[in-house]
Image (cartoon, coloured by chain):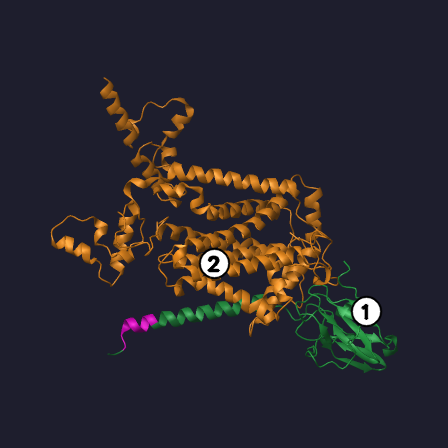
Chain colours: A green, B orange
Amino acid sequence: MGITRRYVLRTGWKIGGGMLALLAGWTSWELLRPLTASGATGKIKLGSPANFTAGTATFVNQGRLWVANADGHLFALSQKCPHLGCRVPFCESSGQFECPCHGSVFNIAGEWITGPSPRGMDQHPLTVENDELVVDTSKKINGADHGSNKFPTDSKGPACAGKG
Amino acid sequence: MIDQEAASGEQIRDGLEPDVYPVAEGRWQRLKHTDAWRSMFRHPQLDTPRGRALQGFSNVFLHVYPVKVPRRVLRLRYSWRLGFIATVLFWILVVTGVYLMFFYTPSVTAAYGDMQQLRTGIGFGQLIRNVHRWSAHLMVLVVVLHLVRVFFAGAYKKPREFNWVIGIGLLAVTLGFSFTGYLLPWDQLSYWAVTVGTNLVNYVPIFGGILTDLLIGGPQIGQPTLQRFYALHVAVLPLLLALFLMVHIWRVRKDGFAVRRGAAGAFAEGANELVGSESAADATDATDATDEPAIPAATALALANGDRVRLLGVVDRESVTAEERLTDDTVFAWPHLIVRHVVVALGTIATVLALGVAFAAPLRDIANPNLTPEPAKAPWYFVGLQELLSHFDPLIAGIFVPAGVLLTLAFLPYFDKNPHTESKYRKVAISVFATILVIAVVLTVIGALFRGPGWKFVPPWQHSYLEM
């Protein structure tokens, strides 16, 4: 049974159709994929490290991140909750990050304490360049896994979330 | 003389030639006798069976319906008209949506202002928005109820399996509609509900990141997201829904409109007579298409004996996708069913208008990407999922559970081989479905009514955090 003309034509149509679908998919992806230049990316200068005193968290609007000082260790924590993307505010009274959406709580170093978040708060690398603190928002480090906390998880006072 | 008049009247009523028409009286009647009118409406409104059938066949809108339907279809509790109500709500959404498009700009700098302008500066703007909002909520509810009813009636079984799948597709498109529309006001409620919703997609294994990127078009919800959601909401999803709806309604007729299904399925032994003008054509086509023996044993015997059989008697029962009913138990769809549908449509319009007048669609503060409100709730139909997410890992609660339920539902007719439709023979299926339904309702009620700031338990009699 040799290759018939009908077989060649049918196979040709299938290959042609498949290639058209691939081209349509590629074109759509190129049209719709997000442009990398949008949003907050790149390095942001934060000033002297001494500006960030122990036990405080300072919000940096340009990078949508928190710079937190946990016992002298500085962290640049993404404001976005690893759970479902809500913005996590810092609660002065408890000294913890408390997500308003589903109740995840993180300590001042961004480590997970409780709630449905799958890990601690994501971080951006911090460096000191010419005595100035610099955060690179183009790079993201996933938050620490549950149970790997290095900093205290106790609340220093009443929580903010749940007060309405 | 009387007989002559009667005969003449009968001729006129059955005849279709303009010459036999009585002399037209009045402008309206004269207009209906012009060639131009007849070019648009082929057949006049003749009150005879043939006249009604011809009207139905030659009118694209009337032809959505079969010419005749079983009498029991007229009863409200037969289907509660849920599919039809959902269709009416879709058309209300199309009309009000087009009005809203005249005043809305899909831009993060303008959208919120447009919404405020709609509330205060445009006559009936608020009402149109309210009706649009309430129709959207009701459409989700009605489509879900339609699905539940079809399940309990066992109407997803052979030969309607594929139409059930299309129905699940319609449910998904309806949810997509509602979700994409949710972002458009660009207020705190919409921004954070959509933030939670789109972050769920991130948990899809392997493709989660790509899908999220495609959906929001940037590192976070912003102008590209609003533009994408707008395009999906006003162009892509309506086309998709129209396509699915077209196939869905067409299949309702072709798969057997309102078949009374016996304990052993629609095509049980001793089935009733088959009638209907389309039935013969469908059945003949189906016979051509099948490789299986087309003549059932009983019919073959009848043929061998030289007995007379009806045309459909020689068609394989399984391949007959025709209406099956007693010959004397049918009525014309026009006007019997269509008039009832008109009443239901008017009732639906009155309901959404009343809701629109009584309850205003919410508009919170302008979207603030830095400030998540407490509590940030998803739209009510996703709030059960949000409740589930507060207890389980997002991969399980956000992806596996909903995708599992949706896929199981979609392919249910293909693995539920039980031919029975009565509940007494379907105890397992009904128990499982009812359990899932109760869980979904309980989770939705808890999430919508009993959750407050920090997702803490707050009874609604203390403070209501219900978001619509």
Q: Is residue B440 left or right of residue A42?
A: left
Q: Quadrant of residue A39?
A: bottom right
B284 drawn magenta: no
In the rendered image, residue B370, in percent from the top left (x then y), is placed at: 75, 63
Magenta-tinted stretch: A3-10
Main SS, magenta region, reads: helix
Q: Quadrant of residue A60?
A: bottom right
Return the residue at label 2.
B168
Q: Residues within 10 Å of mark 2 (few under 14, many from 20)?
A: many
Q: Is residue B88 left or right of residue B221?
A: left
Secondary element type, mark 1: loop
Q: Are marks 1 and 2 in contact (CB under 8 Å)?
A: no
Q: Chain of mark 1?
A: A
Look at the picture and state if B342 lies above or below B411.
Answer: above
In the rendered image, residue B251, in percent from the top left (x then y), is placed at: 38, 53
Residue B229 visible somewhere in the drawing: no
Residue visible at 68% across and 60% down?
B192
Relative depth, front residue between B347 and A127 = B347
Q: CA distance from mark 1 to mark 2?
A: 47 Å
Three-letter code, disc 2: Ile
Return the residue at label 1.
A94
* Image quarter of the N terminus of chain B: top left
Residue furthest to the top in view is B1
Q: Chain of mark 2?
A: B
